[in-house]
Amino acid sequence: MQNIDLAANPSTVAFSKNQQSSNATKYLVGAFVALTAGCVVMGAADSLRLAYPGLALVVAGFLFARSKPAYINFTCWIWFLSPLVRRLADFKGGWQEESTILLAPYLVTAVSGLTLLTHLRSLGRPRSVPFVFAFAAIAYGSVIGLTKYSPLQMAPAILNWIVPICFAFFLVESHADYDAIRRSFQSTFLIATLLMGVYGIYQFFFLPPWDELWLANVKTTTFGVAKAMELRGFSTMNAPVIFALTMMATLLVVLGLKSKLRFIAGATGFLSLILSFNRSAWLGFIAGTIFIVWKMSARERTRILSAFFVCILLSPALLVVPGVKNLVAEKMETMVYPRQDVSYQARIEGYQNAFATLAHEPFGEGVGSPDIDHATKENDDAIGPHDSLILELLYSLGWCGTAFYLAGLGLVIWRAFAHPATNHPFEDSMKAVLVAFFAQCLLNDIVYGGVGFFFWSAGAMQLAAITHAESELRAESAPSLSADESAPPFATHEEGDL
């Protein structure tokens, strides 16, 4: 047998290194999962509370250095599952109002901030202008906040504002790996929609004891009653609205996939979305679906509608259950006749009071004020601190900061919907996610925390697609121009036309 000289075969060496890196990634993530599961099974809640965020950060750092798609995959799953891990730890080791486990998503996502530190020059490029505006607005709000609150009080709010934008910036700067990152999002959202959907349905009908313990301790009627078939589903997340908005986003992406698994995943995700009884997410999903059906080609539209109709056909299986039928009918009635809804009246009153206050506070109250000064009490129907994007922005950033932040978002939206590089199925799905979120900007805060993570990621993937396409065009045009020595010196205008 002829010996192969690896030194003479660079591709073989590269493949070997990639394989070793892939194996190391699988072993490390597998060890993290095994250790987490082991702590839960053995009831080592205190160890889990200490180890989970730290180990998640270590794994994230390793994946960030080795494989960006794997890091993105891991980050999404940490957002999806950490609230459930927290509830399991509380079930095994006793309830704790504050849990270090919930730091894990922020720590893991914050690793992406290293890209900001190593790509500071990129902030001067046109593609980074939205991030500069957003960071400037948050910096302004933080300075205002420091005049009223301590840094410790503001720290959670600053994390919720900053980490989604840092991750979005990382996605754009990783445009060279765009195709692999796109596949990572698609595969992650597909499996997550299936698993969260199945668990959400099981949770509603058979309420597990760890979820029952959680509901008993949060003491709020917005989650429903801590009994099977009397709660609002929240699956693996820590609130019905957060779960519903997350499922809305992943479901819109899944509907555009070609995988046969999309039918099962879409059906379970759709049913669990219904069981969240979150009207704003229902509204957003309808708006996103209309956009994606209108935007795609006839063949792609047929594929989308076939998956959507499978979801619709399965919904009557839920509606024959008396408890579900009554709850859905009640929610649908309030959407048709909103003036009869208590929460609608509370929102109108909340907006009136808020604008009366903000008229005398043009500089805002600073980052952290919605949670510190405007938090609602238990079972209070008043508008909450994160029930409106507009109020969140005005309270935290003032009129000037809000203008900067919205200008940044406006640039993202304009680029996403105007550039031809985003006219592909996945990009159209991500645009549908943006449409779905914006459809409820008066009903929810869509840029903050976990919800903001998925919103900013959807926008960043549009910018990454544009940057990736423009880089490929430059790479293709440069060799042809240099090779054509007979070309006149001023005949390079075609490159600009591209």
Image: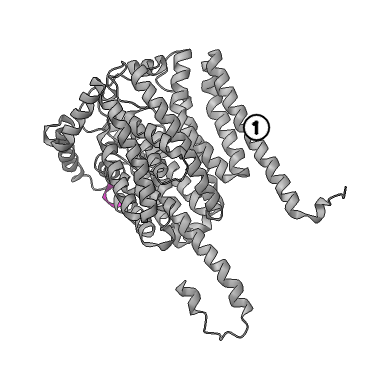
Determine if the magenta segment contains residue 400. yes
x, y percent for residue 428: 39, 52
Q: Which residues are magenta?
A: 397-401
326 or 8, nearer to the observer: 326
Q: Residue at x 33, y 43 (%)?
A: 144
Q: Does residue 164 lie above or below 9 as drawn?
A: above
* Amino acid type, label 1: Tyr
Residue 302 covered by magenta stretch: no
Residue 140: tell me if it is visible: no
Task: Write down the quadrant of residue 143 in the picture.
Answer: top left
As helix, strand or loop, the secondary structure at mark 1 comes to helix
The residue labelled by disc 1 is 27
Relative to 496, is 42 on the left or the right?
right
User: Which secondary structure dominates the residues rendered in magenta?
Assistant: helix
Classed neighbour count for the residue bearing mark 1: other residues with Cα under 10 Å, few (<14), some (14–19), many (≥20): few
Residue 123, x across and y down, in percent: 48, 57
